[in-house]
């Protein structure tokens, strides 16, 4: 019987083995550093997302507090007019209730865990509309909502930011002329197609190709000397990134004088039934 021994010339010596061990330890250290950076980026992204959403909601709250202060001032200046004072207090109280509801909305999302990556679509739409300071009907906007009861594989915080941004853009143009804001959804296999359509003037042709680029504003009013209608131009850019992170798509269709439709294609949590 012949025994084959390994060629000792091909075997690594002690110094080479030590170098390999050091290299493996170096790779492990790099992996730990990479994991730490990834966790840091996740926390940073969450704070950025929450910060953007908070700024949007803060603007809505300001739209509520301004009339509340006006009603309170009116009641203070005419304390002898009981009827006027009561009406002013009722309006102020209603505004406070609305503001409280919006604050609760953002608090719930800020306390949600990063592990919560499933959104109930109808509930998310309802919560998003609750963040609006003013009833769309008061601006001549007809709101139509028809979405199925499905679970979307996207965190409530991120999905609400995307939908709220699109709704606010639509409201800006519809407040001038009135119209319809329609939110519908259809399920197509493992995906849901969420459509947000307005009957506004449409998106100007000169910005359509760059609409999702940073610092491109959709609804800036050239007559607005204070730039109150002009946003940062980051909203839709962030929306696109958030949708792409979950393997979804965002696109729009627009026609001059007919309106604009934003279409979100998102993965859903499919129900799996076991058969015996």
Image (cartoon, rainbow, N blue to C red):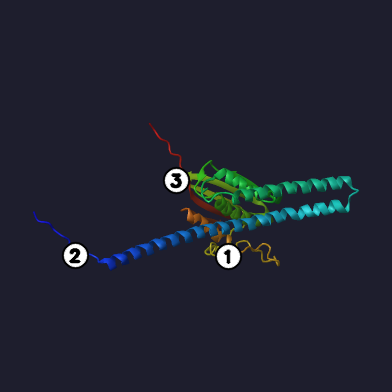
Image position, residue 108 (x, y; %): 61, 48
The image shows residue 199, relative to residue 276, as above or below, that is below
Mark 1 or mark 2, earlier in chain: 2
Q: In this view, does 131 lie above or below 205?
A: above
- Residue lying at 68% horizontally and 65% vertically, measured from the top left: 227
Q: Name the residue under label 3.
A: 190
10 Å neighbourhood of mark 1: few (<14), some, or many (≥20)?
many
Q: Nearer the viewer, residue 138 or 275?
A: 275
Q: Can residue 219 be seen in this view?
A: yes
Report how far apart the C-alphas of labels 3 and 2 lie in the structure.
Answer: 58 Å
Q: Which residue lies furthest to the right in this view?
A: 80
From the image, state whether disc 3 or disc 2 is nearer to you. Answer: 2
Furthest-top residue in this view: 276
Residue beneath the point at 39% across and 61% down: 28
As drawn, is 190 to the left or to the right of 67? left
> From where the camera sits, is residue 258 visible?
no
Q: Determine the residue located farthest toward the left in the rendered image.
A: 1
For the point 12% across and 56% down, the residue is 3
Mark 1 vs mark 3: which is more N-terminal?
3
Q: Report which residue position mark 2 lands on.
A: 8
Query: Does 192 sit left or right of 137 as displayed?
Result: left
Mark 3 surroundings: few (<14), some (14-19) or many (≥20) residues within 10 A: few
Where residue 259 sits, quadrant-wise, is bottom right
Which residue is nearer to you in this view: 56 or 113? 113
Residue marked by disc 1? 216
In the rendered image, residue 257, in percent from the top left (x then y), is placed at: 60, 57
Tell me where residue 20 sits by quadrant. bottom left
């Amino acid at each position: 019987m012949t025994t084959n021994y390994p060629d000792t010339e091909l075997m690594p010596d002690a110094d080479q083995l030590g170098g390999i061990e050091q290299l493996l330890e170096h790779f492990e250290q790099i992996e730990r550093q990479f994991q730490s950076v990834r966790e840091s980026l996740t926390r940073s992204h969450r704070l950025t997302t929450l910060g953007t959403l908070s700024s949007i909601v803060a603007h809505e709250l300001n739209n509520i507090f301004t009339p509340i202060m006006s009603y309170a001032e009116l009641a203070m200046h005419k304390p002898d007019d009981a009827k006027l004072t009561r009406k002013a207090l009722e309006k102020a109280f209603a505004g406070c209730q609305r503001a409280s509801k919006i604050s609760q909305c953002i608090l719930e999302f800020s306390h949600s865990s990063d592990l919560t990556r499933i959104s109930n679509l109808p509930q998310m739409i309802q919560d998003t509309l609750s963040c609006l300071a003013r009833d769309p009907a008061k601006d001549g906007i007809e709101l139509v909502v028809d979405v199925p009861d499905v679970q979307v594989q996207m965190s409530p915080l991120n999905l609400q930011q995307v939908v709220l941004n699109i709704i606010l853009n639509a409201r800006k143009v519809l407040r001038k002329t009135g119209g319809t804001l329609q939110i519908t959804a259809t399920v197509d296999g493992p995906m849901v197609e969420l459509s947000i359509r307005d009957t506004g003037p449409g998106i100007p042709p000169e910005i359509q190709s760059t609409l999702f680029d940073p610092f491109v504003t959709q609804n800036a009013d050239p007559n607005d000397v204070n730039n109150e209608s002009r946003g940062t131009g980051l909203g839709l850019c962030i929306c696109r990134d958030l949708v792409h992170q979950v393997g979804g798509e965002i696109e729009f269709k627009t026609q001059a004088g007919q309106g604009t439709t934003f279409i979100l294609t998102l993965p859903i949590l499919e129900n799996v039934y076991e058969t015996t």
